[in-house]
Amino acid sequence: MTVKKIEIKTDYKKIKVYSEYNADKIEYPLILSIPHSGTFFPPEFLQNVRFDEHTLRYNEDILVDKLLQGAIDSGITALKMEVTRTFVDLNRDRLEVDPQMFFNYPKDREILYDKHCRVGLGVIHRINHKRENLYDGLLDYNEVELRLKNLYDVYHNRLQQLISKCIKKFGFCLVLDCHSMPSKICTIVDSRKGIDICLGNLFNQSCPSEMGDLLATQFWNNNYSVEFNCPYSGAYITFNYCQPRKKIYTLQLEINRALYADEETLKESEDFYTIADDVSNAIINFAQNLSRLSY
């Protein structure tokens, strides 16, 4: 049986990889990373997948960038990926590639075949939110290398530059990696009331406990339920960038989508702006308090 070969030829010169905010003058020892809210779909990609744009968007962290707009407007530095997560996932290791997705995967190529690859959500997604295959054939590995070079590496290189700039000014830096989580998993974990906010600190390894407590308190003060490391303790960005000896700290923020959006239509709910104000104000207060700390 002949296997279909899919060769996607993307014009990266026409793609805006990321948007950055307040990067020229960093006012706080805090950088917001927003890797999964991009809504740009390369047309060449859409022509070669089995689903429409709306279906593919269920894999993204819907509207997280808009939730944080108030914090950004207040002067907090932020970096947001513009390209959809289904095309390349920034919160995975560059080596988290499933060799079985390609017709020409190099035999001597190093891989990190972890749990994300096994379920189809490595750095290059194989499935959608319903666990259906995105492609009806095998990809060209050379094309995927171009995705990583022109998108993944560009974002991460810029994030590292911002971290270095923050360290130079304040002596330390906290990267808050911002995401949303499906309401279903929140109620599975806690069937009594669900979880509103999850803060992942790699089980107290990615930042001093007082940092996490400081942010959690901002949400507790507004009656949000907050859990640490449940259901998520942190993924690649949280793990990769935390270097406590160099005073680089990380924290993963997960917000229950049902608080602010309709999870079927992917549109803002009637409570969106209230939640957005609460989230942004929590981060603003957090940033101001961080500035008073010394490490």
Image: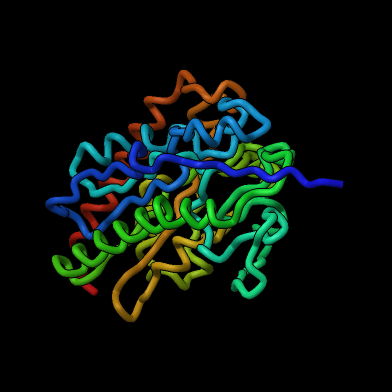
Query: Residue sitting at 54 percent across and 53 percent down?
Result: 144
Please, is residue 200 above or below residue 18 in the view?
A: below
Query: Residue sitting at 67 percent across and 71 percent down?
Result: 107
- Indicate the quadrant where residue 95 lies: bottom right
Query: Where is residue 212 drawn, in percent x and y?
Result: 40, 60
**Quarter of the picture holding the C terminus:** bottom left
Query: Where is residue 194 drawn, in percent x and y?
Result: 62, 41
Query: Residue sitting at 27 percent across and 35 percent down?
Result: 70
- Does 69 sit left or right of 126 as displayed? left
Please, is residue 51 above or below residue 152 in the view?
A: above
Judging depth in this view, the residue of 172 and 162 nearest the camera is 162
- Indicate the quadrant where residue 28 lies: bottom left
Query: Where is residue 58 drawn, in percent x and y?
Result: 59, 33
Residue 58 in view in this figure: yes
- Does 89 sit left or right of 139 as displayed? left
In the orientation shown, which residue stands out farthest toward the right?
1
What is the count of numbered marks? 0
Please, is residue 168 above or below residue 99 in the view?
A: below
